[in-house]
Image: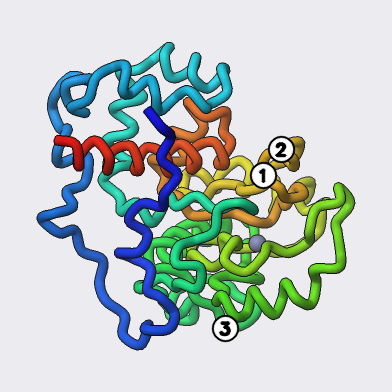
């Protein structure tokens, strides 16, 4: 089967900036059932409704070590997939240097002001509601361990990212990678990404950086640009930049995707395309 690269339901949750005067609540509609409703309670191939060969076709572009990990425990894989597929697909949208959000100037519909949450921020900041709640939970747990975690950057609009990019695009980082994402290509535009504490390469070795490495996933936060994966992600190592993915997706990432967010979101991106195609063909 041809690989589906079209964006999935992002348009249903992200509003085009041009017409974004009113926020609306996220709702499932009858015409767009979530996977879990459709697949609950049956055996893997039956519960997903498609054949093994069709499913295998979703795995072909993954590295062999990930395919092997999935094949080694398919039952757990499908169980964990079911759990994350209860969540709206906009939480798993894949963005990289080649793949922008769609539409490119969209914004999330459920942004909240972080000033109404018990979190520390160094300037006014917004995130999607679920990410704000997960940040508050993470902050509290860190504080309980005597660790101070605060946010220095959250949601960014397309226009803000464009200004930032235009200002910085002549600068490159140490690996020759751009220091700022192009507008439409920043995870910050999803309202799910946060830069914590310090934008310094050695943040990962501080006690705050280490605490995040060990505990962020428990609260649904995933490191987006890990060390030694610069070529894959297109970004220098950023020990401060985390993306809210849900705790269930972080477990899936760790168990089956070598704990590399890029592989997980790339897979889910294709999976939703595959599912859409399958459903259309029904
Ligand atoms: Zn960032």
Give the labeled residue for mark 2.
Answer: 229
The residues bearing labels 2 and 3 have C-alpha atoms spaced at a distance of 32 Å
* In front: label 2 or label 3: 2
Q: Quadrant of residue 9?
A: bottom left
Q: Is mark 3 within 8 Å of ligand 1?
A: no
Counting residues from the N terminus, which is met first, the one under dot 2 or under dot 3? Answer: 3
Counting residues from the N terminus, which is met first, the one under dot 3 or under dot 1? Answer: 3
Using the image as rendered, state which of residue 240 and residue 161 is in the foreground. Answer: 161
Residue 110 x %, y %: 36, 72
The crowding category of the residue bearing disc 3, from other C-alpha atoms within 10 Å (few below 14, some 14 to 19, many at least 20), is few
Give the labeled residue for mark 1.
Answer: 233
The residues bearing labels 1 and 2 have C-alpha atoms spaced at a distance of 6 Å
* In front: label 3 or label 1: 1
Q: Which mark is residue 124?
A: 3
Q: Residue at x 55, y 41 (%)?
A: 261
**Tag 2 secondary structure:** loop
Q: Residue at x 25, y 72 (%)?
A: 25
Residue 132 x %, y %: 44, 67
């Amino acid at each position: 089967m041809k690989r589906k690269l079209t964006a999935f339901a992002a348009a249903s949750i992200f509003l085009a900036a041009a017409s974004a005067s009113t926020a609306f609540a996220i709702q499932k509609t009858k015409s767009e059932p979530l996977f879990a409703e459709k697949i609950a309670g049956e055996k893997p191939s039956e519960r997903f409704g498609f054949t093994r060969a069709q499913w295998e076709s979703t795995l072909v572009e993954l590295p062999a070590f990930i395919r092997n990990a999935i094949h080694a425990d398919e039952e757990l894989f499908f169980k964990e997939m079911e759990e994350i597929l209860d969540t709206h697909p906009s939480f798993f949208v894949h963005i990289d240097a080649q793949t922008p959000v769609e539409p490119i100037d969209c914004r999330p519909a459920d942004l909240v002001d972080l000033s109404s949450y018990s979190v520390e921020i160094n300037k006014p900041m917004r995130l999607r509601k679920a990410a704000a709640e997960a940040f508050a939970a993470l902050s509290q747990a860190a504080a309980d361990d005597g660790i101070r975690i605060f946010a220095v950057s959250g949601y960014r609009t397309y226009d803000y990212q464009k200004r930032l990019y235009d200002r910085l695009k002549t600068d490159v980082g140490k690996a020759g990678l751009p220091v700022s994402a192009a507008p439409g290509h920043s995870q910050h535009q999803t309202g799910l990404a946060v830069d914590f504490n310090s934008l310094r390469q050695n943040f990962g070795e501080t006690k705050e950086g280490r605490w995040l490495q060990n505990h962020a996933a428990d609260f649904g936060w995933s490191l987006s640009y890990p060390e030694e994966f610069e070529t894959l992600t297109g970004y220098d190592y950023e020990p401060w930049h985390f993306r809210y993915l849900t705790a269930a997706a972080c477990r899936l990432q760790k168990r089956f995707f070598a704990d590399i967010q890029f592989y997980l979101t790339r897979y889910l991106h294709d999976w939703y395309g595959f599912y859409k195609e399958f459903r259309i063909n029904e």
